[in-house]
Image (cartoon, rainbow, N blue to C red):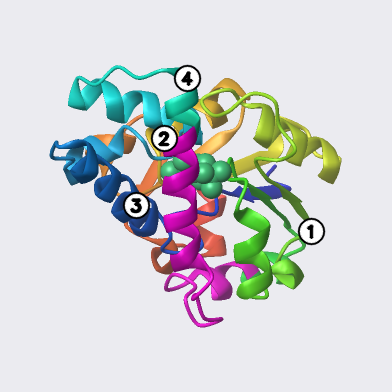
Amino acid sequence: MIRACLFDLDGVIVDTARYHYIAWKALAYELGFEFTEKDNERLKGVSRMASLDILLEIGGVKLSSEKKEELADRKNQNYRTFILKMKPDELLPGAEDFLKELKSHNILVGMGSGSKNAMTIVERLKLEPLFDVIIDGTQVTHAKPNPEVFLKGAEALHVEPAACVVFEDAAAGVEAALKGGMKCVGIGSPEVLGKAHMVVAGLSEMNYEKLMQLK
Ligand code: BG6
Ligand code: MG
């Protein structure tokens, strides 16, 4: 029985994964090394500070924690210049239709994002009415691949983890869903998200009938 769907935000509902990438790439450039799209896969779904640690490891750079705080903050300021310009029509193709279809079948809809900027995006794109519950990076102690964000979402919806399906574009997010005892649909490439129960290129490929195949 599937009673709820929990959606990651960045890279699933909105195309912000590319803004995170642009901002990290700019920081790497400043520090004097290349940061490729393949490298970026390791950062998807990962918290801000853990992302910076991975980036610095790739560049072979060691810094004090004070300097790291400063760089993470600078990346975030840069990232925010992008999201503050987002328009209500920047939802990824198929996202709004699928969420509405779920509601019409009485499936509960939640958001489970590790981002502390999630509410800025929710406000700018007026996403609140599409969700029954929103859990973001300000409400969790443990970042993905820890399942906390999804378990909190399930709890707030009063649904057992086993009756939840998570939609994720990041390997760390797929791992979080599985650790939480939930089903998972990967959004992106099977190469990266192979552990998910199903992988599709985007939410435009999803519908209620396909969801029910996961039962
Ligand atoms: C996730 C993104 O949703 O949020 C990561 O996939 C990002 O790339 C993480 O690092 C934390 O985001 P923020 O906005 O709190 O820096
Ligand atoms: Mg994501």
| Residue annotated with mark 2 | 196
**Quadrant location of the N terminus?**
top right
| Residue annotated with mark 1 | 132
Residue located at (24% from left, 21% from top): 61
| Residue annotated with mark 4 | 65
Q: Secondary structure at mark 1?
A: loop
* Mark sitting on residue 23: 3
* Mark toward the viewer: 1 or 2: 1
Mark 1 and 2 residues: CB-CB less than 8 Å, in contact?
A: no
Amino acid type assigned to the residue bearing label 4 in the image: Ser
* Mark toward the viewer: 2 or 3: 3
**Mark positioned earlier in the residue sequence (4 or 1):** 4
Q: Is residue 12 visible?
A: no
Mark 1 and 3 residues: CB-CB less than 8 Å, in contact?
A: no
State how far apart marks 3 and 4 are (Cα).
20 Å
Amino acid type assigned to the residue bearing label 1 in the image: Asp
Amino acid type assigned to the residue bearing label 3 in the image: Ala
Q: Quadrant of residue 163?
A: top right
